[in-house]
Amino acid sequence: MDRPLLISSLLEFGARYHADSEIVSRSVEGPIHRYTLAQSHDRAKQLAKAMARLGVAEGERVATIAWNGYRHFELYFAISGMGAVCHTINPRLFHEQIVYVINHAEDKYVFLDLTFVPLLEALAAHLPKVAGYVIMTDKEHMPETKLENALCYEELLAAEDGDYAWPEFDELTASSLCYTSGTTGNPKGVLYSHRSTVLHTLAVCAAGGAGPTNRSSYLALVPMFHVNAWGLPYGCAMTGAKLVLPGPRYEGDMIFDLMDAEKVDKAAGVPTLWLLLLGEMQKRGCKPDGFETLVVGGSAFPTSMIETFEETYGINVHHAWGMTELSPIGTSGTILPAMDGLAKEARWAVKNKQGRPIYGVEKKIVGESGEPLPEDGEAFGEMLVRGPWTARAYFNDAEATAEQFTEDGWFRTGDVCTLDENGIMQIVDRSKDVIKSAGEWISSIDLENAAMAHPAIQEAAVIGMAHPKWDERPLLVVVAAEGETPVLEAVNAFLADKVAKWWLPDDLLVLDELPHTATGKVSKLNLREQLKDYVFPGV
């Protein structure tokens, strides 16, 4: 029974027992591409043979800079399946950070979509260890490029047959490498094993209705360059779910049309994308045909949006939480049977929380001196996590490892949270974002969620700014809804029965846009830098 847990087995199983299940992609070249799991398996084996011919050896890193598409799906399985390491790179990182992660990982080859040819041409001189570049297109669309040793993906595959047997090796072999978004300092690498990835896949597929099944048509809006698209490519391969991939286009109408055409019943993504889709749904007065479950993670989802999706459109909102270091899923927002009879407001309050641990995730909250805190829904402290797919160190980064990992094997998440008696987690704030005013704590996340329900506000961020009397006070920074002009007095009147009086912001600023991180979250680090000279009125 001691068989190794290998990523190749997920696709092999899907190709054999769900051979006709579809993978549908909006291609970078333009048209919709459609094929089956069995066909993807054949091409992944061709690709593995091609990489072996290029000299890629077990344990070497191969980078991808690509959108969600069928070729990227093939790379997920071909690279790790042959024993190499699939290093997905977020193209939204600063250029200096992209250079850093490629050099730090010592990537041998870089596979890139057409979109990113100019980016790599600009950076290639700083990437001395890269042996070559594979442009993910066909001969017809292959561009003229200044990249040295540039190869065409489809020509590379065409030179190989599918006569390839996936090798067997130790399940603890490294399979993929993801870097954090690098909001402070250089991005940090998290190396996953075949074992950790397969176990994570099993847990995601059992995550209380949010995971893929053989009856699902699942849209992965979460990028494949961001923590392995939350594990969805692996889960869809294993279960035979229809996998729908949006390619490079993330406009609200494009998302709606793709979901509607492919009868997507489940979809996963970050709040900014759901905001785009909601705007399109409101324009059309309907939801995409068949859409039932929305999985949201990455940052807090305002209660007002949960209510709109569920009450107006009948779409079940399923909150999840995770981190790169957790592969990434850590919780699932399943409503317990005992909560089925809750009043609407109480139901929204539960839905707004990040959910309960899935099997394999062990959690605790601790105080400033490291002491465990009670799980009563009131006490809050830093969340610590461990488990079979939680990282134990950063890749080749002893200093960052010493900061974030305890000697007894816990990962310090940096999230300040509560846990209640049912294990339901609620993020109060990031440890660096919580606001300390006159010795009391103010949750910027709770204040933002409350403010987002105001009809004049499209997007909101709350940051603590220096105050001579109170240490820090909250500053509300917003993007106005179309045709609206939010003012402090009206917003505070709206918030008066939703938060404590001393939480009310001391000022409100309206910006054209808020800065965002490479993963789509509001960058409070950049926002603080942008407003470093701000002084509260009358101070």
Image (tube, grey):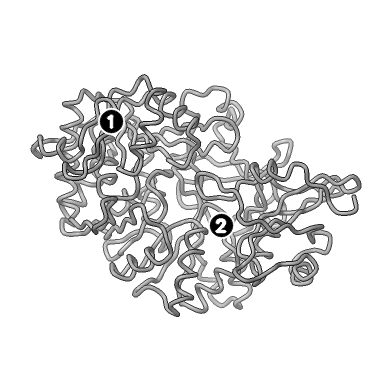
Instruction: Please rate how many residues cluster around mark 1, counting C-alpha atoms within 10 Å: few if below 14, some from 14 to 19, many from 20.
Output: many
Query: Is there any visible trace of residue 372 in the rendered image?
Result: no
Please name the residue that numbered disc 1 is placed on. Answer: 133
Q: Earlier in the sequence, mark 1 or mark 2?
A: 1
Instruction: Write the residue at 56% across / 66% down.
Output: 351
Residue 263 location in percent, x, y?
30, 70
Q: Secondary structure at mark 1?
A: strand
Residue 180 location in percent, x, y?
50, 37
Vertical relation: 464 (above or below) 252: above
Vertical relation: 71 (above or below) 175: below
Q: Amino acid at mark 2?
A: Gln
User: Is 440 or 157 nearer to us in this picture?
Assistant: 157
Quadrant where the image shows the N terminus? top left
User: Is 278 or 386 nearer to us in this picture?
Assistant: 278
Horizontal relation, residue 389 to residue 42: left or right: right
Please name the residue that numbered disc 2 is placed on. Answer: 354
Q: CA distance from mark 1 to mark 2?
A: 40 Å
